[in-house]
Amino acid sequence: MLDHHPSAAQDTRSRVLDAAEHIVQSRGVPALTLDAAAREAGVSKGGLLYHFASKEALLQALMLRLRDHIRQQFDMVRQTIPPGPGQSARALLAWQFDSGCATDERTDRAAAIFLAAFHHDSALLDPVRKILADIRADLLADGLPPGHGLAIMAACDGLFMAHLFRLYTLDAARLAELRASLETLLETAP
């Protein structure tokens, strides 16, 4: 019998979410079913249904957890950047190139979440779209010339997607060149 103590419930919920990510990452979107997630997490189907009444609810929870992770990681990096013009753009560069967040295991699992959500219903990506819209708004108010912050974000997004989907890998020299090019966009900050 499932213990409904809050910490046990949270543990079960996290195990199911981790299992769902693993299924999509290792076997693909079609393999994600409620039964498969329950088996992978080591919980009964009833235990899974207690937390997620449908596949859509499971996918929505995955996206919300990803949203929270992105927000937490970006805010953590941003707090290390001195205030002033270009702070958000500098935080994006630090997040992408210095923090390790852009290429860690959690980020690798994000690819599975994006694919599963997009495959099921692209509206499920809305929580992440909102976080990215918030970051874009920060960039627009960042004190840089128009387009400079957005160019940095677009480049970082491109590297992120290239990593997630294994599209290409840049060696250390090319990454350094790219970063130097992007940093020139910060030199015009007042």
Image (cartoon, helix red, strand yellow):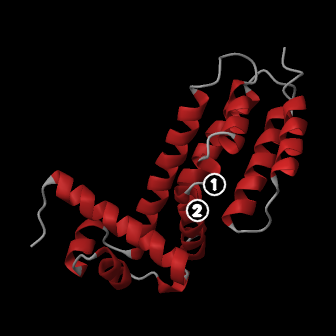
Position of 176 compared to 53: left or right? Answer: right
Residue 169, located in which quarter of the rendered image? bottom right
> Residue 19, position in %: x, y?
39, 72
Q: Residue at x 77, y 68 (%)?
A: 167
Res. 150 visible in picture: yes
Residue 108 is marked as 2
Q: SS of the residue at dot 2?
A: helix
> Residue 16, position in %: x, y?
34, 69
Mark 2 and 1 residues: CB-CB less than 8 Å, in contact? yes
Q: Point out the image quarter for the C terminus.
A: top right
Res. 57 visible in picture: no
Amino acid type at mark 1? Thr
Residue 163 is marked as none
Is 17 or 138 nearer to us in this picture? 17
Q: SS of the residue at dot 1?
A: helix
Q: Residues within 10 Å of mark 1 (few under 14, many from 20)?
A: some
Residue 103 is marked as 1
Position of 43 compared to 182: left or right? Answer: left
Instruction: Look at the picture and state if 162 lies above or below 149.
Output: below
> Residue 20, position in %: x, y?
42, 72
